[in-house]
Amino acid sequence: MGSLSVWHWLIFLAIVLIFFGGSGKISAIMGDFAKGIKSFKKGMTEDEEAAAKPDPNAPQAPKVIDAKPATPAQPGTQQGTKVG
């Protein structure tokens, strides 16, 4: 129970090789990870900005004109009508 098996040693060796196995592998991995997060955040803000701005080419709803009905004319004041 106190000793490590072959699989434990292989996993430990793989972790050691990843961390210390080359020039700047960890910093390269972390740099790629940071670039991925930045591009994800940029994509999210672009999506929010695109949703906030209306599309100029999109069809717009017709405008409703509120018109008041004409007032009825007084009797005898219409053109072409003779009073009397």
Image (cartoon, grey):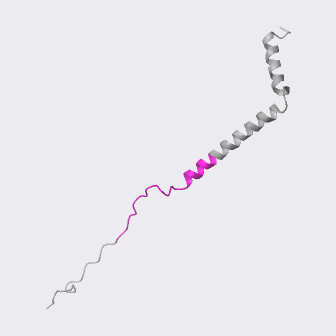
x, y (%) of residue 48?
Answer: 59, 49
Residue 44 vs residue 73: left or right? right
Exactly how many numbered labels are in the figure? 0
Identify the residue at image location x=63%, y=48%.
45
Identify the residue at image location x=35%, y=70%.
67
Seen from the viewer's position, the closer of residues 56 and 76 is 56
Instruction: Name which quarter of the figure residue 10 lies in.
Output: top right
Residue 27 vs residue 65: left or right? right
The magenta region covers 44-67
x, y (%) of residue 12?
Answer: 82, 18
Specify whether residue 11 is painted magenta. Answer: no
Residue 24 vs residue 84: left or right? right
Identify the residue at the far top of this view. Answer: 1
Specify whether residue 62 is painted magenta. Answer: yes
Q: Decide: is 46 above or below 16.
A: below
Q: Decide: is 26 above or below 40.
A: above
Seen from the viewer's position, the closer of residues 73 and 56 is 56
Q: Decide: is 57 above or below 15.
A: below
Identify the residue at image location x=83%, y=11%.
4
Identify the residue at image location x=38%, y=64%.
64
Prevailing SS of the magenta stretch: loop
Identify the residue at the far bottom of this view. Answer: 84
Q: Quadrant of the C terminus?
A: bottom left
Identify the residue at the far front of this view. Answer: 23
x, y (%) of residue 82?
Answer: 15, 89
Instruction: Name which quarter of the figure residue 76 lies in.
Output: bottom left
Q: Quadrant of the N terminus?
A: top right
Residue 27 vs residue 57: left or right? right
